[in-house]
Image (cartoon, coloured by chain):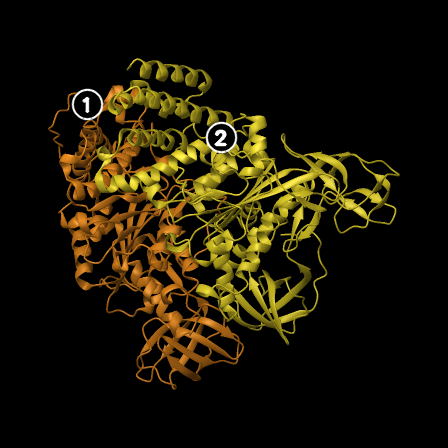
Chain colours: A orange, B yellow
Amino acid sequence: MQKEYQTITEISGPLVYAEVDEPVGYDEIVEIETPDGDTRRGQVLESTSDFVAIQVFEGTEGIDRNSSVRFLGETLQMKLTEDLLGRVLSGSGEPIDGGPEIEPDEERPIVGEAINPYSREYPEEFIQTGVSAIDGMNTLVRGQKLPIFSGSGLPHNDLALQIARQATVPEEEEGEDDEGSEFAVIFGAMGITQEEANEFMDDFERTGALERSVVFMNLADDPAVERTVTPRLALTTAEYLAFEKDYHVLVILTDMTNYCEALREIGAAREEVPGRRGYPGYMYTDLAQLYERAGRIEGKEGSVTQIPILTMPGDDDTHPIPDLTGYITEGQIYVDRDLNSQGIEPPIYVLPSLSRLMDDGIGEGLTRKDHADVSDQMYAAYAEGEDLRDLVNIVGREALSERDNKYLDFADDFETEFVQQGFRTNRSIDETLDLGWELLSQLPKEELNRIDEELIEEKYVEDEGETVEAEE
Amino acid sequence: MSQATESDVREDGQIESVSGPVVTATDLDAKMNDVVYVGHEGLMGEVIEIEGNITTIQVYEETSAVSPGEPVESTGAPLSVDLGPGMLDAIYDGVQRPLDVLEEKMGSAFLDRGVDAPGIDLEKTWEFNPEVSEGDEVGPNDVVGIVPETPSIDHKVMVPPDYEGGDVVDVKSGNYTVEDTIVELDNGEEIKMRQEWPVRSQRPADEKQTPDTPLVSGQRILDGLFPLAKGGTAAIPGPFGSGKTVTQHQLAKWADADIVVYVGCGERGNEMTEVIEDFPELEDPTTGNALMDRTCLIANTSNMPVAARESCVYTGITIAEYFRDMGYDVALMADSTSRWAEAMREISSRLEEMPGEEGYPAYLAARLSEFYERAGYFQNINGTEGSVSVIGAVSPPGGDFSEPVTQNTLRIVKTFWALDADLAERRHFPAINWNESYSLYRDQLDPWFEDNVAADWADQRQWAIDTLDEEDELQEIVQLVGKDALPEDQQLTLEVARYLREAWLQQDAFHDVDTYCEPEKTYAILGAIKTFNDEAFEALEAGVPVEEITAVDAISQLNRIGVQEEWEEYVAELEDDIAEQIRGLY
């Protein structure tokens, strides 16, 4: 099927249109050779009996109407092998670390098939990230997709790195020898700057995490269209490692905003009817096809957990990218500008953050019996404290009742002691929950209406007084 | 999908172009909405446009590597579902292919393409107990026999609605497959346990009646403030994270319907898995049988093909109507109708149709109202009465209720449960905003509640609404001047309203006891708060300062009623305690 054509009729943005006389499959891979001998790869976006529309990954610069077009007769495949661990690849899956060529055990189409909901296993294994605001309040479990909603200039990368570094499943800590051997990180970078990339790579190398990682790098100056395949390559690799090789894979995708921009660019070039803010109408489906590739499968050891990072344009979570993401993912972690400027590390804003799978991943036998109650109570108390802050601005603290003042103190301490921990501190779930009890014990017992009475008797720290010191 | 009729595959066409889920074909002899098989792999699709020699098809499966020139076959029949015993306890994709059978056939946890499977097991035998004998005259939809399908549901085998009917000449009894003829009529019509019905047309019924029985949900805020009728329609719009899915799951678990059809339309895979794993372990509160015995699940997750997402709500409602014809009360949950609307938009934009508001097709409103109109309390043609209640979740982008899907839905439905991100953030669940929500069934349903629960049901509810309204107004002042600046009686009202919110409106879906609250308990909790209110105001009038009243120990126990299993005694004792302690103040 390697027929060659020199029939390009139109080049527009990232798209090339060519006439064909033999049928070409939808989604098929295309090679275009420019007169200078350069080879560009692309993919069929639309196929009719007389012409095809091709999206070129590496940019259309230098392509003219005399360039030759070759259809390879197959859809885009990822070369897969366990030896990928420790490698750094380009955004289109070619090695860029100077190492040897990849010798695949298997090749798989990158589009990926949907997991049959009947074959899934419900995720309920607690992952300890060592970050109190996540473990205590928005617990992550294996097989979940939990994005970080951030803004430009915020330390979301530090948070992602902290999670990648610290993530463990507590029960494994006992058999420390083989721990880590089955944990893998896949890092898919889309349109991030060289500096950010260096930050990640340095951290990976320093902590030795690289040997259990596969890195896909599409940098800010790499072709935008390539970004549409990078996450698919990363996820295909993740599925292979998880469901064939029994790894617990953590996939970090950054920055999804750049991915969506690339989608919009292609949509605009095809003159499609745009949806909200010019993003294509099928963006929900497209994002779902990425995010839904997280999960566990019955009868398989491994799992795919996703932490996509996205920067919300203008910190606006109603923007289509965070909005559609939130509808697909199982919760979200908000990184907040105000907390960041107060020096809280990590600046996680707990109130709008959410982990949908938390309820099934915590409790007796998983984390601790009191986990759900403590987290609920802290949410409610923090929310009340937040409300009162508005009031304080108007009437001043003196005008408030004693009860209200306690809630205000709670909200302050919650931020400076519970959320604040530094990007290098690793807190166990016990430490996190005990800290929670300490803070809650500032409030009168009667106020703890979301906690089981027996638990209050057992855990409430009496005579707390004014000084609450957190052991860090 | 119905494929049992090895339908006479007719004229071949050829693929002309492929663009995602939209394929055009030439020389295809097919009618509008016919099901076709596309390409060498036989991917299932549906005709959505015919223009001259060009037929446009939406394909229900992934189209990678499909190329022009491949064959297209028409089945000559519209998209239909298989109806018969075996649908309960099943889990289907958007075109009624059983997901467990697909897993087996594909030998993989991933969904492959080009695999088809009938909606109900064609080989399994069922015990058929005839209800008619030779010589009886039967007409369309008349029940000819009963199959005990699950411990809780008797499946009634009916004459298909498109049959003429006549005199019974032969009737069988015993174990048969759904393909065997069990009743024969004098005009030659053969009745089997299986029938087919095209998903896009409503099953006929005699008359739609005004519903007057509530669909009791076991959720305090729903039963207490915004009840839904059996045969009614409700919408749950809310931004992400506000608890749409949990509310839908709660309804699917606890609503007192005979049959529940749960449509996961563009939902998360893990959430569907939760349903699949949870439901078989749960008990139906009315019958005590496994919840799965009355449930039919349709799961088309967000990463499954978009065209099948468009069809899954129709598949669901057709199954619901079939059970309605048997005289059952059916509740259909669609989560989320926004995904369905977006699937329409996606297909429409691939067809390059002129877009309406926000890129949605101009026929969005028509499709939505067509769908919701299939709900109702019906007098069936076989003389029974049955209902289909539809509860649709809506996911408005950015939580903005002014967008087209929410607005067009609100024009049709009569119950509106507005979910609120603010409430969700402070973990007030269910996060249904009591100021924005409404139910137009209230007056219709009050007689039922008055007869079955308490004679002053409506009055007490009105008291709760008034108190909550007053709180809402007072809160604005509190925001400006602080609570302590209010007169004492208003401070007390705020305190009472707080208990209404915390003890009555809030309900913990994950607590074993609190997850289901019968209407009597809903009424009792409200009664206890009212007792506190009355005692407290009397004490206030007698000159007791408000701080002293609200500091009474027993009051905070109000928040614990929800989790009590033996709530009758608990409430009685608590009411006494409250009265005694408050009276002790003066």
Seen at 56% across and 51% down, the residue is B313
- The dot on residue B59 is none
* Residue linked to disc 1: A461
Instruction: Kindly identify which chain the residue marked by label 2 belongs to.
Output: B
Question: Horizontal and vertical percent for residue B284?
Answer: 55, 30
Q: Is residue A207 above or below residue A449?
A: below
Discs 2 and 1 share one subunit: no
* Rendering quarter of residue B174: top right
Does residue A6 appear left or right of residue B181 in this picture?
A: left
Figure quadrant of residue B52: bottom right
Residue B381 percent across, percent down from the top left: 74, 44
Up the image or down, A151 lies above or below A390; here it is below
Q: Amino acid at mark 2?
A: Asp
Residue that mark 2 sits on? B459
Drawn side of residue B553 relative to residue B316, left or right: left
Quick one: SS at disc 1? Answer: loop
Does residue A111 appear in this view?
no
**Label 2: which secondary element:** helix
Image quarter of residue B485: top left
Relative horizontal placement of residue B445, taking residue A405 as reference (left or right): right
The spot of residue B418 in percent (x, y) is 43, 45
Residue B115, position as x, y percentages in the image: 58, 54
Horizontal side, residue A472 vs residue A432: left or right: left
The quadrant in which the C terminus of chain A is found is: top left
How far apart marks 2 and 1 lie (CA) works out to: 44 Å
Circle 1 crowding by C-alpha within 10 Å: few under 14, some 14–19, many from 20: some
Circle 2 crowding by C-alpha within 10 Å: few under 14, some 14–19, many from 20 = few
Label 1 resides on the chain identified as A
* Residue B415 visible to the viewer: yes
Residue type at tag 1 = Val
Disc nearest the viewer among 2 and 1: 2
